[in-house]
Amino acid sequence: MKCKILHESKGRIRVRFCQKFMTLHQADMAEYALSSVSGITKVQVFDRTCDVILYYRCDRKTVLSALAHFRYNEETEALVPAQTGRALNREYEEKLTSAVMRRFLHKFLLPLPFRRLFSFFTALKYLRRGLKCLMHGRLEVEVLDAVAITVSMLRSDLNTAGSVMFLLKIGDILDEWTHKRSVDELARTMSLGIEQVWKKTEDGQELLVPVTQIQKDDCVIVRTGSMIPLDGKVIAGDAMINQASMTGESVPVHRYEGAYVYAGTVVEDGECTVQVENTAGSGRYDRIVKMIEESQQMRSSAESKAAHLADKLVPWCLGGTLLTWLLTRNATKAVSILMVDFSCALKLAMPISVLSAMRQCAGSGITVKGGKFLEAVADADTVVFDKTGTLTHSQPRVAKIITFGGRDEAEMLRLAACLEEHYPHSIANAVVAEAAQRGLLHEERHSKVEYVVAHGISSMIDGERVVIGSHHFVVEDEACKAPDEPIFRHLPKEYSHLYLAIGGEIAAVICIEDPLREEAKTVIETLHGLGLSNIVMMTGDNERTARSVAEKVGVDTYYSEVLPEDKAVFIRKEHEAGRRVIMIGDGVNDSPALSESDAGIAISTGAAIAREIADITISANDLYALISLKKLSDALMKRIHRNYRTIIGFNTGLILLGAAGILPPATSALLHNASTLAIGLKSMTDLTV
């Protein structure tokens, strides 16, 4: 791209592209393409002037080379996300400009008779709003606006009436822009995060392929605990599907052959083959926006308190107006009170604060579904951790394989991987990874695979029943015969054990090394310091393993050999004792406890059903995100309470000054709207943690 350098300083350069005009899409292409260059830290593109400002830490030659090689083509277009926010900002910039220009033209160019007529027709909109509120039995801010404008019009005070309506118009535009911008920024940080899917070939084989390779009419297989990657129709099988993220349904729905299923929903039980109808990204942004909008219904109690208080104060404002007029017989003083209300600021600042906190969380790898869950984290005193994949790494490793009856070690691992590859669990992933590392190919030799949550897997291979799972599942539930060999009675105690049985006899034990997260102990100590008094670990592992991990990380209490329902029962009892509980897990077996807790937190690399049910999802890179989440939650509640005090105090001051005759109505309206905007913009800024 040919360009001209306009200004340059250390680490910053401003250039102008040599083109007559720049579209919004071209501006996005320039921004995202240049931002992808290593060493360029920030890019600002001004489409109206075709100017680009680049901030960089690399060599100047690298920046100039990037500018020289930049082109508007398919390669750069692929870097631009579906939504960027540029069009949204342009839309509201034009609305503001239009409103200001109309105000100028009407006030200074229209003759007085036309101004009266225009003011009258403009006022009708606000009168309808006020009457609509009254007809529904509500006394809200619209009633105050209607009364203020009506009184000014009856007094032939066109300047005050026009100023009030102009400020209300500007306030509406800014409120809407602020809200939509916050939602847009948050939505653009979120995605489904599906990378690979099981594709069914024409000859019936299953291949694990990147989701980007899936085309329309391809068939994908989705099993228990997995997310449906793309929209399509079920052509085989049936499943119970959690569609809460799409439809808001609180219970799973049965989907069978011929039914339509949606990307982002999760299979809770069963399996199905889906013929894809819409490929990657179809409607994803709109669905995420819908989820965010719905999440705002999950208000924290502080938000709800502010909203209810705002509505309750409207009658008091009306009463104060009437009382002022009765005592002073001064309509100007009375109207000054009407210019001020608490509703706008309270109802704008609180949700914006929450959206800002959710956006900041998303920037830290934390996805939150509503303000009530951030409040729950701030108020919680008890945290329940699952062990595997949470306090330990989500990628455990196979340490050794012990076989019995002279069976071949490689063959046993190949068989185990053949079964485990279909289900999203950290231990299953470890088995599959070990087989891949050893170069062991595992063809599909089994019939239908059955998965028993928190226990194991069973299938038929070469006419024999094969099961793999915990000691409880294989030995006790399935009654498989233990080998009469000394090594079986003295299995290494430092490992977790995965039992493989063929034809009713244990054929091998796979020893799983479950390395502790390096940061786990520090994170738990920090959480204690942030006010969480009771930190609990619950695991399905044996007492020995559980005790060892609990001592290393410093939890207050631990429970071993627990089932999924045991975790949920524990949380229920904590609630009965008056405690607020956070649950952190990553597997299908954690889903009941995640649902039962005040705020369920899932690890992003865990099972899809856990992420779907959870209220919050954190990055699995490390557990420090939990500290960030706690600090952001605490900071959010402080901001909400600070906003609450500021709004009440400032607007009360405006009312008193108006009643005293110090502030005229137009000035009261200006200061009120300016303060509302200022608090709203402040609420959009990052929280200090």
Image (tube, rainbow, N blue to C red):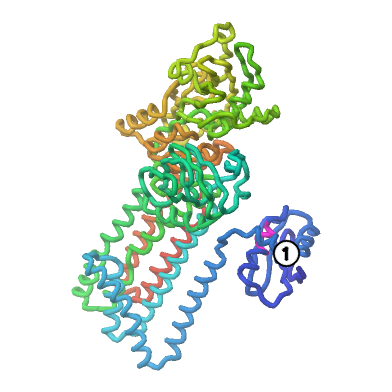
Left/right of residue 20 with respect to residue 258 in the rendered view: right
Left/right of residue 525 with respect to residue 214 in the rendered view: left
Q: Residues within 10 Å of mark 1 (few under 14, many from 20)?
A: some
Answer with the quarter of the image where residue 126 lies.
Answer: bottom left
Give the x, y percent position of residue 312: 26, 60
| Residue found at the very far right of the displayed protein | 61
Q: Quadrant of the N terminus?
A: bottom right
Is 360 drawn above or below residue 537 in the view shown?
A: below
On the question of residue 637 being in view, the answer is no
Rendered residue at 53%/30% (across/down) = 447
| Residue found at the very far left of the displayed protein | 326
Q: What type is the residue that disc 1 sits on?
A: Ile
Most foreground residue, 186 or 148: 186
Q: Secondary structure at mark 1?
A: strand
Segment colored magenta: 30-35
Q: Mark 1 sits on what residue?
A: 13
Most foreground residue, 234 or 13: 234
Rendered residue at 70%/29% (across/down) = 439
Left/right of residue 627 with respect to residue 26 in the rendered view: left
Q: Is residue 93 magenta?
A: no
Rendered residue at 59%/20% (across/down) = 510
On the question of residue 492 being in view, the answer is yes
Most foreground residue, 254 or 495: 254
Considering the whole magenta stretch, tell me its main secondary structure. Answer: helix
Most foreground residue, 210 or 20: 210
Is 162 drawn above or below residue 382 in the view shown?
A: below
Give the x, y percent position of residue 125: 33, 77
Answer with the quarter of the image where residue 633 lies.
Answer: top left
Rendered residue at 32%/29% (across/down) = 573
Give the x, y percent position of residue 479: 45, 15
Give the x, y percent position of residue 202: 60, 44
Left/right of residue 574 with respect to residue 402 in the rendered view: left
